Image (spheres, rainbow, N blue to C red):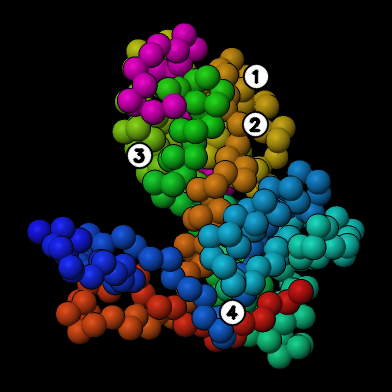
Amino acid sequence: MSTAAIPGAPLPVRTPGSRARGRHRRPERPEIPAGSPALLLAVPAAAGPESRSVVEELLSIVRSEQNGVLTAAGYLPTGGTDGQHADSRHTGGTTAERTVAELLTEAAGAGLPTPVVVPLVPGPHGFLPELHALAAEYGAQVTDTLGPHPLLAEAVHVRLSEAGLARADRARLFAIATAADGVVLTTVGGQPAADAAGITGMLLAARLAVPVVAAALDIPGSVAEAVAHLKEMGAQNPALAPLVIGPEADAELLAAAAEESGCPSAAPLGAYQAVGQLVASTYLAALPAVAPDFGADEAEDADGTDLRGNGRHAAQ
């Protein structure tokens, strides 16, 4: 019986809830402490209108996910010229449109902590050797690529459903006349990228309950071969699903693949919410971890670690 049901008993007093204990507690969002390095998003493209819109939106998602993190975007076009990314204007209060090299140089010259470099690609890509070589000159850490990861499979699934090529979720059992019965997961970065995409493809196949085959847009005949393979497996309506965020792939490659294969295609992932979350979690995983201040009984179950970095300021 509660005290409120006892005559003369004082009214119940609401007390602040304590942090849930145990393995099934609700995870808490780790805070970015003072002294953490900035997140430098390395974009494998020139700073143009299309790449800029995707990058700015992703950085906005990162900042909303992790309040306090300082972000910057550096462009690293493959085979580009200096004139392609010379624009230094600020857009909407975000970072200037400069290269990774320029931002790392500014941070080093100002004595600021070296940013953590996160490459904006879902897997292996031709710009990564150049990025690693550049970062090594400044002693900067380059994180792993964003995939393979279940969040990327989720993002591809959503883009397919938006194009009418897949059900939005498996609970909605209504029929879609244009639904694909096989998917070619297209990416860029040659065979290594296609191999890595195959892992995300398995996750996507589990979500869609249809066969998924990975192919590289930048390998001639790769997409056509994948489509033929799906048809041999019995697929009558295969579709293309780009495992491409956007800036890392030439839009003409995507259009040509759809035209040559005769298959409908979903849109690139773009600034999907889960991609921004993945950028944030990749950055957090690269920070030095310190055990959180839990009780002794929770020490062995410290999932939400308190992260510590080496500096707070980013090259602006």
Viewer-proximal residue, 250 or 115? 115
**Three-letter residue code for mark 2:** Leu
189 up-or-down from 134: above or below: above
SS of the residue under disc 2: helix
Q: Quadrant of residue 99?
A: bottom right
| Residues packed near mark 4 inside 10 Å, few (<14), some (14 to 19) or many (20 plus) | many
Disc 3 marks a residue whose amino acid type is Leu
Amino acid type at mark 4: Pro
Are the residues flagged by discs 1 and 4 in contact, CB closer than 8 Å?
no
Q: Are marks 4 and 3 in contact (CB under 8 Å)?
A: no
Which circle's residue, 1 or 2, is located before the other in the chain? 2
Q: Earlier in the sequence, mark 1 or mark 4?
A: 4
> Rounded to the nearest whole Å, what is the CA distance between mark 3 and mark 2?
22 Å
For residue 116, above or below residue 277 = below
Does residue 36 appear anywhere in the picture? yes
Residue 134: which quarter of the image? bottom right
Mark 3 Cα shell of 10 Å, populated few (<14), some (14-19), many (≥20): many
Q: In the structure shown, which secondary structural element does the residue marked by tag 3 occupy?
A: helix
For marks 2 and 4, the one nearer the N-term is 4
Give the Cα distance between marks 2 and 4. Answer: 36 Å
Instruction: Give x and y (percent) for residue 33.
Output: 52, 81
**Residue on which the image places disc 2:** 254
Disc 1: which residue: 259
Disc 4 on helix, strand or loop?
loop
Q: Which residue is mark 4?
A: 37
In the picture, the quarter occupied by the N terminus is bottom left
From the top left corner, tell me how far across and down residue 242 is, in percent: 55, 35
Q: Which residue is mark 3?
A: 203
Q: Earlier in the sequence, mark 3 or mark 2?
A: 3
Question: Whole-Å distance between the Cαs marked 1 and 2?
Answer: 9 Å
